Amino acid sequence: MLLQAFRANRKSTSIALKSAIMAGVSAGSLMGAAAHAQERAPDTGFLVPEIIVTAQKREENANTVPMSITAVTGEQLVRTGVKEVRDLTKVSPGFSYADSYVGSPIYTLRGIGFSDISLGGRSTVSLYLDQAPIPFAIEGRGVMMDLERVEVLKGPQGTLFGQNATGGAINFIAAKPTPGFAAGIDASYGTFNALDLTGFVSGPLSDTVGVRLAVQAIRSDPWQRGYTTTGENGADDLQSARLTVAWEPTAQLKVQVSLNGSIDKSEGQAGQLIGISPALPGAAPFVPGLLTYPLAPATSRAADFNPGVDYGKDNRFRQISARVDYEFSNGIVLTSITSGSRFDQDQLLDIDGTTLSNFSRDTTGKIESFSEELRISGDLNGDLKYTLGATYSADDVREFSLNDFSQSSQALLFTGFGLPALKGFGDSNSQKTDTQAIFASVDYAINEDVKLTGGVRYTRSNNDFEGCTSDPGDGSSAAVFGPFWNSFRAQMGMPPNPPIANGGCITANAEIAPELVVDSLNETNVAWRVGTEWTPRERTLLYANVSKGYKAGGFPSLGGTSASQYLPATQESVLAYEAGFKTTTTNRRLHIDGALFYYDYQDKQILGRVLDPLFGPLLQMINVPKSRVTGAELQASWFPLEGLSLTTGVSYVDSEVLDDFVNYNPDGVLTNLGGEAFPNTPKWHMLADINYVRPIGDRLNGFVGGGVNYQGETNSQLGELPSLNVKAYTLVDLRAGVESQTGNWRLWAWGRNVGDVYYWTAANRNLDTTVRFTGRPATYGVSIGYQFQ
């Protein structure tokens, strides 16, 4: 009904690990991890809090769960300025973010990430809102509103959270209806006339029903500006809302229904031009203005784009989910989580970084998803905890992209054959995926100090695909490819193809006949996890886990002149080994988490290239047979005195493609990629935050604080072209303000990237240009929050 309603070397690695651990311990002796927010105790002052998480789909103290977790409270998210999923880099070591050139986000955890250019590309880091899936990464904008906490679960989470969580899972826990009336508003105003208004109202409707409504509006002026024109771009315009209704008719039955959604009309970021590299050098002199186009100055805001064009998106997401928990008299709990969602996309992106029509992409698409999870859990005498369940999901993704490259060298590709210039083409992609799974998880206590854990999930999925590259609808590409394909057929003694209709497919099969590519991918896998944990003393946990997870295969959405380009990439797998500890001092002033991990990566999916006999290297989704990740991570939190909290985290990730893996680099040159690090995977990620609160008189507190975020160097694509390097950078945020000692209001000023660092998160090689996606310059503002109770 919901669907209907919504339709190397190991020695050198060990030395690097030791260095990472030593650096982390040094930092941990001074600061503590973003996993914990401050908490005032009546007599003893500020202590390490005990945050309750649902990492194993039951409520537990985060410090007792045998896996690496970064748990961040809603209070801390507001204080540190974390407003989007990408901002979690400020609080979660090992998490990185990059922009893809088609506007979809790339999330990476401990080196496990996935870069795709299709609307239906699945991330290796799964997103959940109150355990209801947000199936695709592009649907996550607006989810950070009015949260109780965020849980970042690291390492394969395939047994409980399913496939496509090989890197980990992020669970957003929304704030729930309150037992009494409560309301609040938070407002921020800053650079570029940026306005962020968030409010909620909550309370009971009856003795058994509670409700909470939260809304958010984010708007700002453009932050990018042309350097050869007076144009501006990059305005924010995002509206989000969430309604949660909780019904508890009896002590045994709990029902929660949530409706949430967002409307994103923000302008898509334009790339910053850093190089001219024509795809067809011989044709480039015949493209007016291309070879002499000035490169962008090295400043954050500089970017060129076509003047007079509206780059405002019209992307809309809505989701409804229902959770039902029923507890039987013997303590067994039956849980059902049903979710239906729809995402509509309509966005135009200027990809080339110039005012020429060199390469732009106008995408319209739709995603409809449905999921159901039914599980039963219980506890036998406190010694054996178990969860048994089954899931079903269905995703229907339809996408059409209109690509305009009328002022590019590739537009002249066929003019030497006496054919007209190409203006562009369309990309059609339809994928329907059905996934079924059964799973089980158990925790067994051998004694009070030692436990064994295990889990297994069997998954079967079917993906039906239809797609091709097509005429844009005006007959321009049909007029080129129709005669072109027929010329080859004539040389082979074959009769001519019928004329290609306006909007018809131009992708050719092995017989050089245009066709709609129809294919399917059927896969099964068994994810599993085994582990042990030991509690040698109170508030100290040692653990070791071995787990295996899978990411489903899929079909690409790209410009394909050959049907072979649409062959799917098969599923990838990660076999993960992790050993770690969690410890808190007896006075609860200091807490440290640490972990070592090794990932054996098989069939990593990348956007590579295959050799076409007519056109040379062309894009295709492919698998890297063997690769690995070795790393270490440390998080700590320290409350040395009343009012002072310090947090820090550091991660070291050493990734490598193993053996000889030969493919084409972004310049189309055949290259041995063996030994290279993964794209978008900095070796070092360090973060720290400090906050100090001091009474001012009898009614007010004053506070000051700040954060530091360091991301090491990486590269945006395999091939390690210098032009695609992402340099290391360090960002510093500051804040200061006052608040009432009752906690009902707060006023503060803040600055982000106060050093005005020029940095970028990704770079991309396009048809004729190379561009960067820069981070924002220094911004400043004021915020106020007020709670009514």
Image (tube, rainbow, N blue to C red):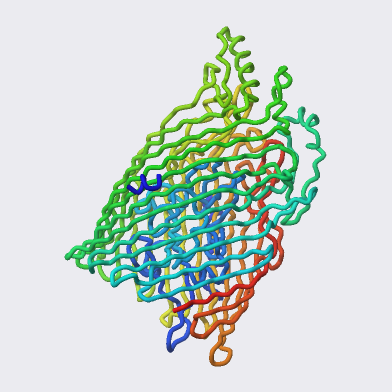
The x and y percentages for residue 529 are 35, 53
Q: Residue at x 79, y 48 (%)?
A: 229
Residue 594 visible at all = no
Q: In the rendered image, is residue 764 in sight? A: yes
Horizontal side, residue 99 vs residue 184: left or right = right
What residue occupies the far top of the structure in this picture? 493
Q: Nearer the viewer, residue 613 or 767?
A: 767
Position of 701 with respect to 327 (left or right) is right
Query: Residue at left 37%, top 70%?
Result: 61
Report the residue that reaches farthest toward the right. 292
Q: Position of residue 137 (x, y in %)?
A: 50, 50
Instruction: Look at the picture and state if 33 lies above or below 377.
Output: below
The extreme front residue here reads 205
Q: Is residue 237 above or below residue 211?
A: above
* Residue at 80% over, 48% down: 228
| Horizontal and vertical percent position of residue 467 | 50, 30
Location of residue 759 by image quarter: bottom right
**717 or 271: nearer the eye?**
271
How many numbered tags mark residues here?
Answer: 0
- Which one is in front, 642 or 428? 428
Residue nearest the viewer, comparing 119 with 537: 119
Q: Residue furthest toward the left?
A: 329
Q: Residue at x 51, y 22 (%)?
A: 515
Compared with residue 409, is residue 479 higher up or lower down, i.e. above or below?
A: above
User: Residue 486 is drawn in which quadrant?
Assistant: top right
Q: Position of residue 313 (x, y in %)?
A: 59, 48
For the C terminus, the image quarter is: bottom left
